[in-house]
Amino acid sequence: MRLFSVERIFSIPGAVLAFGIVFSGIFMGFAPSALADQVAVPDSGFVVQMTTQEMPRPHTPPGNGSLEKPAAGFTARAGSVTKSSVFFDGRVSRGADLSCQWSFSDGSVISSPTPVKFYDGPTVDFVTLKVADRAGSDIIIRKVTVSGDGKVTVEDYTQGRSGDAGDGGIRAPEPYQAPPGADFGQVYSDGMAFLATGNLHGAIQAFDAALAIQENSADAFLARGMAHFQQGYLDHYAFDGGEEFVLAINDFSRVLDQDPGDVNALLGRGASRVYLGEHYGWRAYIRNATMFGYYDAAVDDFNRILAIDPGNIDALNGRAYATLVRGTGNPAVKADAGLVAAAKRDVDLSLKLDPENPRGWFILGLYYDHEGLFSQAIDAFTRAMEQDPAEPWYPEWRGYEKFRDGKYADAIRDYNLALALHPGFAQAYNIRGMTQAMLMADDRTRELSDFDQAIAINPSISEFHRNYALALADWKYWDKSLNEHAVDQLDVALKLDPSDYRIYYDKALILTSLNRYHEAVENLISFQQYALTSKEMADSYDLMAYLGWFPWYNTAWG
């Protein structure tokens, strides 16, 4: 029985999001005229409370300061795969938002808080765990022994603190300090220089200082909003950045309070609202009205721009994207063909006005994906890649279309390209793992490693944990330890996203294989409370009958 299911989170698979809706126009014309010719701001991409109230901002700039340094630690316990599988757990480490890197004696490296290592037999391994956060990093090395009967023992070996040893751990950038006696123009100019060189933290701090001098400067609010937006866009490759988008919305709204027709602020706010919708959408299988409200608000901003400039390509692309997401719906909301058609009209006009517009080709590819026209979608994403070969979302989506068309090996090559462009691209690891699973190779560690990497990049995404759990259970379905670990991962997934009712059914299947029938039935009952289709109900009744819940069971369900 194959447990692993391959699907993206949404009907318009989760990526439609941050992707390539990059508004180059956002960064044009927002510096004072004296600086406009001096500073070239890097191009960027494209929400959760949809509020424009000013959020409290930290007064202390990022830096090591008095932050407590992290401390590495881990445990290990035995599995039962050939008596040589070991479950490691680094969550006993101390720190905030820790990243983990495990190194084993065979040279393998894993980035996950809870990796599984499969040894060939009895062994002694010296396992290194490095953890890091903003305050620094720490390393611990422990001796792990797997005996012939599968027993695992762990002994301390040695350990070093990054602060003492100077191991080159993560260092936060130095906080910006305005020169003594600097006026608004000088501090603002420093912020623009930071923005141009990609030092977004420095830019934000400089604009904070500028606004402390001239508190109602629309230029400084706009520039700081751009910096927050760009940071959020970069963080979105890991499906983070929500707070940055909210801060960007606040700043753009302050500009619009002074000038309701400021096109750059409208573009920035609309784009930030789209990405904020994506940020929360990736955390909920069933998108609710509040999440869809982000896209509706973004469309309002784009409509205001198009009322001023009907040929604004960035606004056309933004409206097309937001409308397409709305029109696609989700498992609980029926698709709206009228909205999908409206999105197609916008993207057609965008490409008519500028045929070399990569975002337009990208959105056209998303439209074809929705329509199930895989070859046309592949062609559209290829055109986007030709126009902008540096954007990782384009090959990731082209790979997904190849995957949907059954061309798994070709799809993996596109995912590899996306990861070469951005090694921290969480969704590329996730979708590559799902595609690896379809190849049904004897060595399933590749797909497990991909899910492991996705979780390491962002452990707050339920879908990553669900896919990892199903891959584990599907690989060696007879192995009790792996199945128990899979159930644990599904519990994590359900806690992260209670709206994903599919997880109850996933758990019921695995619990059945573990002979934990009562728990399986409990999960099936929970699944039935939220199931949306008659097929889902029929499948759950079939499994309940198998478990003996219905002694009068017959084979005529549905």
Image (cartoon, rainbow, N blue to C red):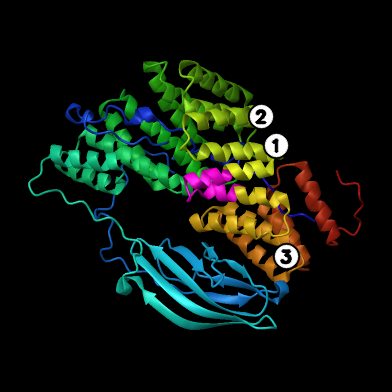
Is label 1 in a helix, a strand or a loop? loop
First along the sequence among labels 1 and 3: 1
Q: Name the amino acid type tagged 2.
A: Ser
Mark number for residue 405? 1
CB atoms of marks 1 and 2 within 8 Å? yes
Is label 3 in a helix, a strand or a loop? helix
Name the magenta segment's main secondary structure.
helix
Mark number for residue 375? 2
Q: Is residue 283 visible?
A: no
Instruction: Give the distance between the C-alpha atoms of the residues marked 2 and 3, in whole angstroms.
Output: 44 Å
Q: Position of residue 440 (x, y in %)?
A: 73, 53
Q: Residue at x 91, y 50 (%)?
A: 555
Q: Position of residue 458 (x, y in %)?
A: 50, 54
CB atoms of marks 1 and 3 within 8 Å? no
Viewport quadrant of the C terminus:
top right
Mark number for residue 148? none
Bounds of the magenta segment:
415-431
Can you identify the residue that label 3 sits on? 519
Instruction: Give the distance between the C-alpha atoms of the residues marked 1 and 2, in whole angstroms.
Output: 8 Å
Front tag of 2 and 3: 2
Which residue is more in the foreground, 190 or 277?
Answer: 190
